[in-house]
């Protein structure tokens, strides 16, 4: 929805739509509201098609893509592999579109696994190269506490806001103890991709997390690489 208007995406195109008094959705002409408005059909999996589309003429890739959901975003090779893993015949795809049925559970599960693998790979790549990463996806934080050489008396305090004050959560490698070294990180610092730099700058001895031959200026990248390897 944009400014009270409703759009649907079909292939790579956005179409403005409107629901009629009969409950059917139709595509509006971009310039002439009085022009013919073809009706839309939905497959209950988040995908739309024009009523005059001919699924029986589509190739396998188009049939898969037009199922909607994750099928629209995974690459062609992965999509083909996911389909073959179901053991279903191509005729099933045509029937799904003609009958307006949702994606088969076997295919949905295969695509969900592929999408999860893709997201994990993206997270690991972001950690390795210190790229911005949403806090809820930053699995490097707990991995940091499991790294060989991590001082057990060092704890991490993550603040919920963009500054190092206010509500926070502590992460420890062991039970709370006296004399802890607290490393403070704001949410914005965590999401900026500079986790390694912020942590090393507050450690009593930052050299413990890298090889002896790593010079100080290269320690943040060396730590990012170790974290990525820990997550693999």
Image (cartoon, rainbow, N blue to C red):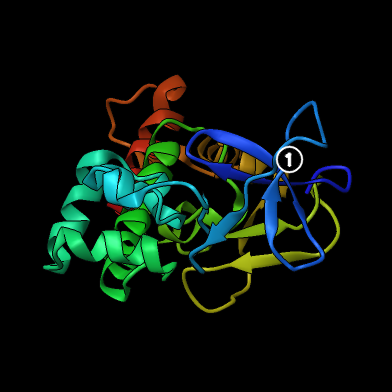
Label 1 sits on residue? 28
Q: Residue at x 38, y 60 (%)?
A: 97
> Who is closer to the viewer here, 220 or 205?
220
* Above or below: residue 231 compared with residue 153: above
Figure quadrant of residue 199: top right
Figure quadrant of residue 20: bottom right
Check disc 1: other Cα within 10 Å, few if <14, some if 14-19, many if 20+.
some
- At mark 1, the secondary structure is loop
> Who is closer to the viewer here, 96 or 223?
96
* Left or right of 84 on screen, residue 173: right
Q: Residue at x 34, y 37 (%)?
A: 225
* Left or right of 232 on screen, residue 181: right
> Who is closer to the viewer here, 4 or 157?
4
Q: Residue at x 19, y 49 (%)?
A: 80
Q: Count how many numbered circles sit on residues in the image.
A: 1
Q: Is residue 119 visible?
A: no
Residue 206, horizontal then vertical, whole percent = 47, 39
Residue 31, horizontal then vertical, whole percent = 79, 26
Residue 8, horizontal then vertical, whole percent = 63, 47
> Who is closer to the viewer here, 26 or 103?
26
Q: Residue at x 38, y 36 (%)?
A: 128
Q: Is residue 196 visible?
A: yes
* Left or right of 54 on screen, residue 8: right
* Left or right of 193 on screen, residue 57: left
Residue 19, horizontal then vertical, whole percent = 77, 58
């Amino acid at each position: 929805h944009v400014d009270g208007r409703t759009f649907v995406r079909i292939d790579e195109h956005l179409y403005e739509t409107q629901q009629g008094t009969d409950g059917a959705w139709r595509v509006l002409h971009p310039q002439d509201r009085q022009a013919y408005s073809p009706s839309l059909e939905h497959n209950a999996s988040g995908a739309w098609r024009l009523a005059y589309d001919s699924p029986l003429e589509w190739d396998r890739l188009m049939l898969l893509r037009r199922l909607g959901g994750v099928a629209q975003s995974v690459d062609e090779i992965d999509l083909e592999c996911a389909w073959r893993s179901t053991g279903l015949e191509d005729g099933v795809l045509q029937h799904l579109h003609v009958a307006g049925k949702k994606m088969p559970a076997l295919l949905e599960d295969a695509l969900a696994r592929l999408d999860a693998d893709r997201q994990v790979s993206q997270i690991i790549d972001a950690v390795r190269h210190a790229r911005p990463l949403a806090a809820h996806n930053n699995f490097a934080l707990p991995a940091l506490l499991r790294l060989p050489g991590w001082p057990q008396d060092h704890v991490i305090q993550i603040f919920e806001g963009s500054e190092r004050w206010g509500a926070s959560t502590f992460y420890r490698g062991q039970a709370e103890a006296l004399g802890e070294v607290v490393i403070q990180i704001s949410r914005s610092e965590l999401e900026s991709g500079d986790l390694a730099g912020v942590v090393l700058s507050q450690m009593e001895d930052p050299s413990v997390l890298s090889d002896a031959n790593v010079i100080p200026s290269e320690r943040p990248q060396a730590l990012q690489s170790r974290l990525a390897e820990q997550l693999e």
